[in-house]
Amino acid sequence: MVIAAPIITPVNPISYPSSDGEPVAETYDHFYAIAVLLEMLQQYLAGKQATVLGNQFLYYAQGLPRMRVAPDVMVIFDVPPGGRDNYKIWEEGQVPAAVFEITSKSTQITDTGFKRDLYAQMGVQEYWLFDPKNEWLDQQLQGYRLQGETYEPIEDGNSLVLGLRLSIENKKIALHRLDNGEKLPFPAELAEQVNQERQAKLEAEQARQEIEALLQRYRDRYGDLEA
């Protein structure tokens, strides 16, 4: 007689927290660099099967909630767009294609040691370090591309997985499209463009109304215009 082993359901299912109570960034410059980069990448990838997440837990070992890391910004392709409270690789089926760490003196050992090795082992294709305060990196913006199982420096600032060229502008990462050279606007620049377009529409509508008023006065005095 064969006795089947009972299926035991854990009394307390495994919890994967979405926050550890730590601050998002070390300084305002770090926070602003993260927020701006996150918004630009979200706008750039809008409508595509991709998501951009910022400072959220990335869980990489099912059943082991302590096996986690929180990239400052990560881009994942071939997944449904939109936000998540956290990201579990085994549920989504994709590792990040690119990870950005907005680094500082206090995080340099982790950023260049543990995290760099971990992302390479995961198969993250590109790893970028940006030092907004220019405190410790020899080059304020440094990129690495996975070659085999190790990272090699990116010399030209081009992100091939994103199709963007990265540069520095006023303590922020600036992005240009590789296909046409177009610069992606910073959020403040985008807001200014929207305001200018709105103002132009208002002025055009005002001009149209003035022309219609002039025509109406003409009709009232001389009758309808003949073709």
Image (tube, grey):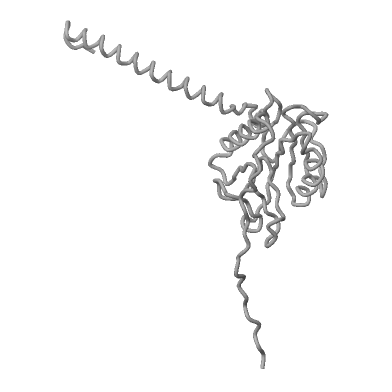
Q: Quadrant of residue 50?
A: top right
Give percent across and percent down for residue 203.
39, 15
Give percent across and percent down for residue 41.
61, 36
Nearer to me, 191 or 50: 191
Furthest-front residue in this view = 21
| Quadrant (top left/top right/bottom left/bottom right) for the N terminus | bottom right
Give percent across and percent down for residue 82.
54, 46
| Quadrant (top left/top right/bottom left/bottom right) for the C terminus | top left
Q: Is residue 226 left or right of residue 189?
A: left
Q: Quadrant of residue 167?
A: top right
Q: Is residue 128 left or right of residue 47?
A: right
Q: Residue at x 70, y 52 (%)?
A: 68
Q: Quadrant of residue 28?
A: top right
Give percent across and percent down for residue 212.
27, 14
Furthest-bottom residue in this view = 1
**Vertical arrangement, residue 97 with respect to residue 64, above or below:** above
Nearer to me, 112 or 163: 112
Q: Residue at x 61, y 36 (%)?
A: 38
**Vertical arrangement, residue 169 with respect to residue 64, above or below:** above
Q: Residue at x 61, y 43 (%)?
A: 53
Nearer to me, 113 or 39: 113
Q: Is residue 196 left or right of residue 187?
A: left
